[in-house]
Image: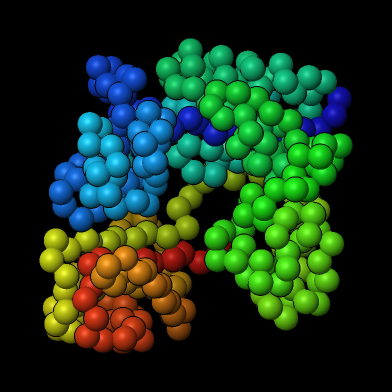
Amino acid sequence: MAAWILHVDLDQFIAAVEVLRRPELRGKPVIVGGNGDPTRRSVVATASYEAREFGVGSGMPMRLAARKCPDAVFLPHDAPAYEAVSADVMAVLRSFDAVVEVLGWDEAFLGMSTEDPWAVAREIQRVVRERTSLSCSVGIGDNTLRAKLATGFAKPAGVYELTRDNWVAVMADRPTEALWGIGRKTARKLSELGYLTVADLARADPEVLAARLGPTIGPWLRTVALGAGSTTVRSTPWTARSRSRETTFQEDLVAPDEVAAQVSELARRVAQDVLTEGRPAARVAVKVRFAPFFTHTRSMTLAAPTSDAAAIEDAALTVLARFAANRPIRLLGVRAEFPAD
């Protein structure tokens, strides 16, 4: 039997969980984010497919989402509820004869040997829906990259296969941003070099990429365009790579002492999360969103991993000092990153 990798991705997961809790919302545009009040500053965590038809997407300011879809139902973000449902889904996936690598609340890779991956994919969809009432899309691939990308073609609630055999036909003419790991900023840099499509990037000069994007990332992007990816799925349980806290202010902060006080408070809350997690922090980052909506993040590596609240707070304030002062701030965040395994 051949070795396959399946990528299972729950459809509109957070919105779907909310609809399960409130069946009367089925078929209506649902937007989840912040405390659920679109008049307050916060961003969209997820939107149901019905809301997405109005142009609402994750990361969008809730106020803008309300203007795009004024009839939507707005709900607060409830992380514990999503974690509990996610655990149920992952338990279902582990009931299959496969190695399961959890990537987050709503997605996982399954590594398996089978003569018919499509039959397995359909069975996964059936059992997930039967036991959790959630729908999922399944990507089939001969490595993790292709399986992950295949899921995008499968949504919603479908199955798609992407392998070496159809890679060029499916991906060659697509923009570089269609590749896993390439975002808008990187795509823009590639465009400046003349690499507009996946095929362009696959033919790129590694030395040119290295000079523009770094000696590691640059050449790696070319391998992604060629469809190369890992063929190994690890069953190590998913663990958070970091813990973070952030606050969106209803009125912009300007005074440096107020900004520092807010960062200190966030850092202390993050430090408590780190202590609860039972793993020390190795790096501390601060996120600042300046008005109207420009977000920047800076970070520093700690001298040694620590769970000490004072050390995490001091690091956060040190990082804060690297930002330009006297600019209106609408959001602050502090993140503690755990050491790589």
Where is residue 239? Give x, y as percent. Answer: 48, 50
Where is residue 15? Give x, y as percent. Answer: 35, 32
Q: Quadrant of residue 281?
A: bottom left
Q: How many marks?
A: 0
Q: Quadrant of residue 139?
A: top right
Q: Residue at x 31, y 29 (%)?
A: 29
Viewer-side residue, 192 vs 27: 192
Viewer-side residue, 141 vs 24: 24
Q: Residue at x 81, y 33 (%)?
A: 3
Q: Is residue 88 above or below residue 235?
A: above
Q: Is residue 3 left or right of residue 234?
A: right
Q: Is residue 331 left or right of residue 222?
A: left
- The answer to whether residue 14 is seen in the rendering is no
Q: Is residue 70 above or below residue 265?
A: above
Viewer-side residue, 172 vs 246: 172
From the image, which quarter does the N terminus lie in?
top right
Where is residue 334? Give x, y as percent. Answer: 32, 68
Q: Residue at x 28, y 37 (%)?
A: 69
Where is residue 103? Give x, y as percent. Answer: 54, 44
